[in-house]
Image: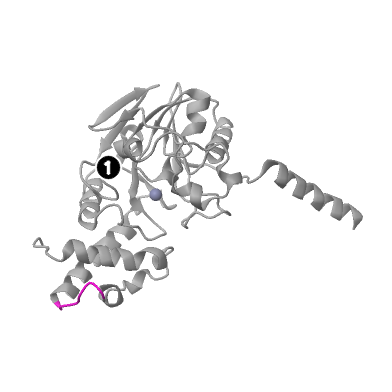
Amino acid sequence: MFKKIILSLGIITTTTLFGFEYKIEPQKITDNVWCFLGETAPPTKENGGYMSNSCYIKTDKSYVLLDTGSSYKFAKKTYEEMSKIAKLPVSDIIVTHVHDDHWLGNGYFKEKFNSKVYGPSLINSQHSHGSKTRMFNILPEDVMHGTEVVEVDVVVEEETVLNIGGKTIEIIPMGFTAHTEEDIVVFLKDEKVFFAGDIVMNGRITSTRDGNLLGLMKALNKIDTMDWEYLVPGHGHDTSKTAADQIKLYTKLLKQRVLTAIEDGVESDTISDVVTLEEFKDVNMYEIFNRRNVFDAFAELEFYDGE
Ligand SMILES: [Zn+2]
């Protein structure tokens, strides 16, 4: 009994001294790709913002990273885990879009390796060194400790090919608004891995708040035409051939049903009560995003004259 008490005191002390700790494990996608696949949930103090995906491409010389998560501490932990696989420096980071849960880990790699950061211009126009982004308001100090905004070094405006340590990595800006105004996708052709950023999510409902539905559907179609075997979503655990099935069905039904409701004379103030997309009601984050997605789709489709 006495021993037990001492033991638990020890645990409390450790927690107080070192604060929040991530428990994470890389998933091997192909021979040279590992991903940390976050919870399909909102950011909370329990998950420490580990609710987006972050991937490592191993080359002969270094790692190239796709998104770095919500905090300095998270990034550091991913690197500790990857060092067990190969102790390589991180030469480059590619950020898929402006949302901060995908790039607040950059500071760790900038500090340790002076990694070069590729990404959308919006990060630099909306944030600057020292500014506090959305995650700082959601996550507690012991999670965010050490986290800082790092600006993008290379704004990706056109297709860019990186040849690093025997790997050819294609960085492709979408070129139109989809999940956000500037989405970047990445293709590792040799291993047929396509990194879709938040254009693809599974196991949760998407948010069209900073993008638009028709652009998102167009981007999903474009991804369909590429020759990949593995599709890594920005959120979600399915990285297989079926990774985009859920969001393709969701966007298709969202568009169809909102258009039908508009034809039936439904107005914007009741559209979210009429179009409920019931078949998705058990998917994570439905309660948070579905009504808003329907409402926004109404505004977008009100004067739609396409097919
Ligand atoms: Zn995201």
Residue 57 location in percent, x, y?
Answer: 43, 33
Indicate the amino acid at tag 1.
Glu
Q: Which residues are magenta?
A: 264-269
Residue 279 location in percent, x, y?
Answer: 35, 72
- Is 21 magenta? The answer is no
- The image shows residue 45, relative to residue 55, as above or below, that is below
- The residue lying at 34 percent from left, 35 percent from top is 124
- The residue lying at 32 percent from left, 37 percent from top is 125
Q: How many marks?
A: 1
Residue 49 location in percent, x, y?
Answer: 51, 49
- The residue lying at 71 percent from left, 46 percent from top is 16
Give the overall secondary structure of the magenta segment.
Answer: loop
On the rendered structure, is 68 left or right of 153?
Answer: right
Q: Nearer the viewer, residue 171 or 300?
A: 300
What residue is pinned by disc 1? 182
- The residue lying at 26 percent from left, 61 percent from top is 251
On the rendered structure, is 47 left or right of 58?
Answer: right
Q: Quadrant of residue 129?
A: top left
Residue 18 location in percent, x, y?
Answer: 68, 41
Q: Nearer the viewer, residue 292 or 256?
A: 292
Q: Nearer the viewer, residue 14 or 63?
A: 14
Badge 1 density bin: few <14, some 14–19, many ≥20, Cα 10 Å: many
Name the quadrant of the C terminus: bottom left
Q: Nearer the viewer, residue 190 or 246?
A: 246
